[in-house]
Image (spheres, rainbow, N blue to C red):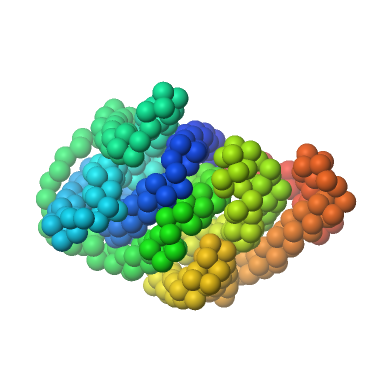
Amino acid sequence: MGKKLSGNLSINALQLVLNQILGLGIFYVLSYGLSKSDFGQLNLALAILLAAFNVLSLGIDQLIIKKIASGAAVEDTLSLYVCHVLITGLSFYGVLLAGKYLFPQLEIYNLVLLIGIGKLMLFFSTPFKQVANGMEQFNLLAYMSVISNLVRCVSLLIFGFLHLLSVQTIIIIFIMGDLAELLGAVFLFKRGTHTRVKITWNKRGYIQLLRESLPQTGVVVITSALARFDWIFIGFILSAVKLAEYSFAYKIFEIATFPMLAIAPLLIPLFTKMFQQKDIAAEKLKFLIRMELIVAAFTALILNICWSPLIDRVTSGKYGMVNAKTIFILSLCMPLLYINNFLWTISFAQGRLKMILSSFIITLVVNVAGDILLIPGYKNEGAAFAFLLSCLAQTIFYCRKNNISELNNSWYSLLVCTGCALLSGLAANAILSNIWLILIASIFFYLLLLVLTAQLRLSDRRNFQKLLHW
């Protein structure tokens, strides 16, 4: 099935490691250097823009990967997507500019308008990244994807070290980083793929592209609302300070999902080709999802044990203990996210877009209802629990709709791995007090329980080697 999974995974993992390190550097400088109020306002603006630009993609980004992997003409497909981002991006920012006259005194609106300039540039770069992904040019994709974070991280560290950090400086740095990524993506794509970049308006082709993406558009609208609805709700209903605390915990939680982020982009072209060729490698799929769940539960275990001692130390007590309950609830979502992403990718590769849309409608309803009911009374912990309920609802739906019989028992590994992590953490904390001893003991207990429950087996080494050569 094309390039070896091991090679693609290594390249994608390296890119993600670098991006996560740079992102963590950016996040740390901002959270440490700004007051909680300013940090919360900045995150509220970014949450609004992230949701908006995700909606503007209309699901075409994922469709482009699938079309290129299926053998569609690269130049024509790229041209259609470039036309789309230009039309929707410029129209959206035009509406934002017009809104300036309606909300001239609204501070958060001014922040959205300014940061939106950079996010518009980043949006314009997405066609080149998605086409490179569909072509399985992961080395090229890695270079294109780190430019913005590299510029922002280095600049913020310099300005922070010189004590020149301010909201105005941050806005300029964000815009320059996103513009650099756009210019770099165009240059690297042309040089790396030797593909001619042309912008040709094709009305019939564009309408057909919109029709093909229509079922996925609903998914994108819903996932965009899910992605940052809790942030926006907290920012407007509670306070910028509470949003600063919650966004810090959520961002670290997102960074902790790195293994899933490393493999997820590789699965769409891989699964698409697998179903096209009608060669369903069921045993490999079963092994892969079990390994993903083991990693997910392990990551959640380490995150909880290290959270308060580590985070309070590096943030001078600002974001550690205050978020201990929130990060625990969010960490319970981690295995659910892994299995949801895996089953979603299979369904997407099979073209079951209406089923996927139904799953996200259910998820949205549960999440929004949970936020509205729980956030006013339970604040950040309520938002985390609402997210947990929505992830659980989606997992149940996917497991019921799964049409590969060999994966019907995936929920068993989900429960066992999560339970092993919980028991390991509780046991280590009950008998020890030193953080390093607790960490070592919990890892030992976790591995032991995985062996006893047959989640880790002697045959796994051989299966892992086969998987890397898939």
User: In the picture provided, is 128 more to the left or to the right than 299?
Assistant: left
For the point 18% across and 55% down, the residue is 104
Residue projecting furthest to the right: 431
Q: Is residue 334 above or below residue 362?
A: above
Q: Is residue 69 left or right of residue 255?
A: left
Which residue shows up at 56% across the image and 69% down it?
A: 378
Residue at left offset 35%, top offset 36%: 166
95 left or right of 380?
A: left
Q: Quadrant of residue 60?
A: bottom left
Query: Is residue 79 shown to the viewer in this render?
Result: yes
Tell me if 174 is positioned left or right of 9 in this view.
Answer: left
Q: Please indicate, yes or no, whether residue 450 appears anywhere in the rendered image.
A: no
Q: Quadrant of residue 139?
A: top left
- Expressed as whole percent of the image width and height from the top left, the position of residue 106 reads 24, 56
Query: Which corner quadrant holds the C terminus?
Result: top right
Given residues 391 and 281, the one toward you in this image is 391
Q: Position of residue 172 (x, y in %)?
A: 28, 35
From the top left corner, tell me how far across and down residue 334 is, in percent. Answer: 60, 57
Residue 308 percent across, percent down from the top left: 66, 47
Q: Is residue 413 above or below residue 291?
A: below
Q: Is 370 placed above or below 461 here? A: below
Query: Image quadrant of residue 198?
Result: top left
